[in-house]
Structure formats: C-alpha cells, structure tokens
Image (cartoon, grey):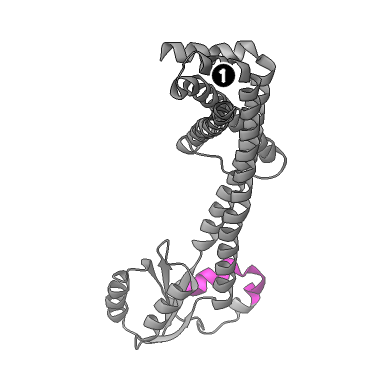
C-alpha cells in the first residue's frame, strides 16, 4: 500500500501540468453538476415554502355550538393527511380581515353586524399537499353537517402540481445530461494521463507485473485527482453561491453532509474513470 501511494504521488511530480489539468477538468465538470444541484436545492426549498401554504378552509354554519366544532376538530386531527386544525371564530375572522384589508377600513367601520363566518383551517402534512389528497380531505370535510362550504384553491394547487412534475422531469433529464458529460470529460482526461505513461505500463507488463499491480497506482492516482477536483468544485460552487447572494437574493447552500458528497463524487468518478482507462489500455497492450 505504501509503495502504491508513493507511486501515485510520484506521478503528480512527473507530470505536474497534466495532473493540474486533470484536477481542474474534474473540478469544472463536477462544478457544473454541483451548480445545477444547488439550483435544484433552492427550487425544492421554494416549492416547500409554497406547499406550506396549502390548506383546506371549511366555513362553519352560523349558530353551530362550539362543542360540536371541538369534537370535529379532534376527528380531523386523526386524519393521516392532517397536520393541524385551527378554529377561527367570527370575531377573529373580522379582526383578520380588518388587519389584512386596510383599504376597506371604511367599509368595516360601517358594518352593523359581522358578515364573516367562523371557519376551520386545515393544514396538511408534507407528502399530502398535492391535488388528489387535498381534494380527498375537502370531500370528507363536506361530510360534516355543520360545514357550509369548503375552499382550497383547486386551480392554484393544480398549477403547483404541474410545477412540481416539471421540476422532477428537469432534474432527471438535465441532471443526467450534466452527469454524463462530466463522466465523459473526466474519463478522457484520465485516459490522457494513462496514455502518457503507456511505455511504463508496457515495461511493467514485460517484466511480469500483474494487471492488479499495474492498476493500483493509477486507481489511487485517479481517486486523489478526483478528490482534489471535488474539493475544488465545492469551492467554485460556494463562490458562485456567495456572488449570487451578494448581487441578487438569499439562497440556501449545501449542508455539511451534502457538501461532503462533492468529495465522495469526485473520488468515485476519478476511480471509475481510471479503472476504465487503465483496463482499456491493458487490453490494448495485451493484444499487441
């Protein structure tokens, strides 16, 4: 293992320019993937924030006893889709309207009686905020005798579902394309390094070295280059994130475990690209 590590590190000294090119190429290839992942991360955050506003509002008939509403709230809390149920009284509904609709303050001042009904505001758990589950909860709410009407913004939730579906397709298609391009670029770069040492591999083959013995330094070298490239890519993504925050708006950055994935991804890509390049070269050498 010590000999393998020494050989891998020695290759950096033998061809510093090519090694730097490999690390830089890996860094920029992963940077593109990481930048897209950062966009997806913030898009998902924005969608979660919008989804948190999804609620079903059931308007209560006037004269409904509070005890009946309280019992119904307990029943609603047992629905698997329901996160919370809030009872808004008629007075609370009027006070909220006066606070939010300041431009109609004159109208409120002229009121003789409160025209706003009491209501139950039902918020749903994550994973149940799509159109199908919201409609299902709304239908069950309509089954309560004291419920006069149910509203949940059907068209708005349908648009949210379409945005969510488009985002999922975009992640698969664009993310897959970026990842495939990164693999091709990294593989080409590592193959250049292997070809540069083609004579050394041929000599090792002639003196009886096994394929495993020949591969090990290259695999370790590729893993080290990939790890350095992954760290470099994380730094580039952070720089882009910092610039975006300064010039435009606040955006979320990767958590430490997510950031560590750059190191893991770089190491894995470097290892895989080296394995493919060396194996292919060994087959070529073996057939000549």
Question: Magenta stretch: residue 99 in it?
Answer: yes
Q: Residue at x 54, y 84 (%)?
A: 112
In this rendering, the answer to whether 279 lies above or below 245 is above
Q: Main secondary structure of the magenta part?
A: helix
Q: Residue at x 56, y 40 (%)?
A: 253
Judging depth in this view, the residue of 117 and 188 nearest the camera is: 188
The residue depicted at 62 percent of the width and 17 percent of the height is 199
Label 1: which residue?
Answer: 201
Q: Nearer the viewer, residue 77 or 217?
A: 217
* Magenta-colored stretch includes residue 23: no
Residue 194 in percent (x, y) is at 61, 24
Q: Looking at the picture, how far across and down is residue 35, in whole percent?
A: 63, 42
- Count numbered badges in the picture: 1
User: Toward which corner of the image does residue 212 lie, by quadrant?
Assistant: top left
Tell me the element at label 1.
Answer: helix
Q: Which quarter of the image is occupied by the C terminus? A: top right
Q: Nearer the viewer, residue 177 or 117?
A: 177
Q: Is residue 236 visible?
A: no
Picture coordinates of residue 278, whole percent (x, y): 55, 28
Q: Is residue 259 above or below residue 17?
A: below
Q: Residue at x 53, y 57 (%)?
A: 49
Q: Position of residue 137 (x, y in %)?
A: 40, 77
Is 284 above or below relative to 140?
A: above
Is the residue 53 above or below the residue 59 in the image?
A: above
Q: Quadrant of residue 198?
A: top right
* Res 209 visible: yes
Circle 1 Cα neighbour tier, 10 Å, few/some/many (<14 / 14–19 / ≥20): many
- From the viewer's perspective, tell me whether residue 153 is left or right of residue 196: left
Q: Residue furthest front?
A: 288
Span shown in magenta? 93-106
């Amino acid at each position: 293992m010590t000999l393998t590590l020494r050989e891998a590190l020695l290759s950096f000294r033998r061809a510093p320019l090519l090694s730097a090119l490999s690390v830089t190429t890996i860094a920029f290839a992963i940077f593109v993937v990481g930048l897209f992942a950062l966009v997806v991360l913030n898009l998902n955050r924005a969608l979660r924030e919008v989804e948190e506003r999804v609620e079903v509002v059931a308007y209560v008939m006037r004269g409904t006893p509070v005890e009946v509403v309280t019992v119904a709230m307990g029943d609603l809390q047992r629905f698997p889709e329901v996160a919370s149920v809030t009872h808004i009284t008629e007075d609370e509904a009027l006070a909220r309207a006066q606070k939010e609709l300041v431009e109609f303050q004159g109208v409120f001042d002229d009121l003789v009686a409160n025209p706003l009904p009491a209501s139950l505001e039902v918020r749903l758990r994550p994973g149940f905020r799509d159109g199908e589950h919201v409609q299902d909860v709304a239908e069950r709410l309509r089954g309560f005798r004291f419920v006069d009407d149910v509203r949940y913004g059907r068209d708005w939730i349908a648009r949210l579902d379409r945005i969510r579906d488009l985002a999922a397709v975009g992640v698969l298609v664009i993310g897959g394309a970026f990842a495939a391009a990164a693999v091709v670029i990294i593989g080409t770069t590592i193959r250049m390094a292997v070809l540069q040492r083609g004579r050394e591999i041929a000599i090792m083959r002639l003196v009886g070295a096994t394929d495993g013995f020949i591969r090990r330094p290259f695999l370790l070298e590729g893993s080290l280059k990939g790890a350095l490239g992954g760290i470099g890519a994380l730094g580039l993504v952070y720089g882009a994130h910092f610039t975006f925050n300064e010039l435009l708006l606040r955006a979320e950055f990767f958590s430490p475990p997510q950031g560590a994935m750059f190191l893991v991804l770089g190491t894995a890509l470097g290892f895989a690209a080296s394995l493919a390049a060396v194996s292919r070269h060994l087959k070529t050498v073996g057939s000549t």
